[in-house]
Image (cartoon, coloured by chain):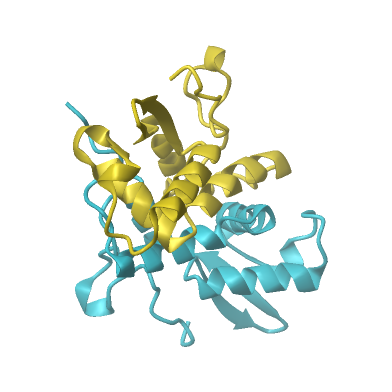
Chain colours: A cyan, B yellow
Amino acid sequence: MSNAKVLPLLEPADEGAAPCCPPLTERPFSPEEAETAARMFKALGDPVRLRLFSLVASHEGGEACVCDISDVGVSQPTVSHHLKKLKEAGLLASERRGTWVYYRVEPSVLAAMGQLLTVRSVA
Amino acid sequence: MSNAKVLPLLEPADEGAAPCCPPLTERPFSPEEAETAARMFKALGDPVRLRLFSLVASHEGGEACVCDISDVGVSQPTVSHHLKKLKEAGLLASERRGTWVYYRVEPSVLAAMGQLLTVRSVA
């Protein structure tokens, strides 16, 4: 965990886990908000990455390594490449233990993205 | 509304508004589920498209036309191009009234995407 970077969708630690952006239906996004949120949506905008993300997110204990992933139809280096992209987008955190790097989903990031998609009630 | 196509994230009408996919944390996505959901995430994975989407989603009355959009720093043809992409991804519906095409967000699609991002509670 010592290598964990500040997740791009979250404010700095002293702000707690406040997400970067309001719900998409609340007001127009600023350019900066759009840059931050688009980076995360883009990371999930690839079918293989999305499958890998759901594999990690639903894996026992909430984490998985490349060694746990065998049935997405791409090579292990490709799996590693996609996991790295998901990490760079702030969606996964990673930790090396022995031979393998283990990945887990950042629940606060999922919650923040979920909030983006909150539907404003229209009277 | 007569031109509205079946939204890709939703089941056919006889199934009601059931979303295509379970929460990302529930189980690994199938290839088909990943294709469908990734298409929507990808559409929101561009900062200009995301700003346009939030402009439409937060606009008075829940709809907007190109004529309402002037401050995203791109030309009107580019705005039209991005709105078309969002429509093709099933995120916006459109209706021509007189000179202009009006776009509005599909609330059921936002709700379905929000459900994808539901965080499974971990004991």
* Quadrant in the rendering for residue B21: top right
Residue B32 visible in the picture: yes
Please name whichever residue, B37 or B5, is drawn nearer the observer in this view of the structure.
B5
Toward the bottom, the furthest residue is: A2
Percent x, y of residue A88: 53, 75
**Residue A77 versus residue B20 in the image, above or below:** below
**Residue B17 versus residue A51 in the image, above or below:** above
Toward the left, the furthest residue is: A123
Residue at x-position 45% and y-position 42%:
B113
Toward the top, the furthest residue is: B14
Number of numbered discs: 0
Q: Is residue A96 left or right of residue B117?
A: right
Percent x, y of residue B83: 44, 45
Residue at x-position 79% and y-position 69%:
A76
Percent x, y of residue B72: 32, 60
Residue at x-position 46% and y-position 87%:
A2
Percent x, y of residue A39: 47, 66
* Quadrant in the rendering for residue B12: top right
Residue B122 visible in the picture: no
**Residue A42 versus residue B65 in the image, above or below:** below
Toward the front, the furthest residue is: B99
Residue at x-position 49% and y-position 49%:
B81
Please name whichever residue, B1 or B58, is drawn nearer the observer in this view of the structure.
B1
Quarter of the image that includes the N terminus of chain B: top left
Please name whichever residue, A75 or A66, is drawn nearer the observer in this view of the structure.
A75
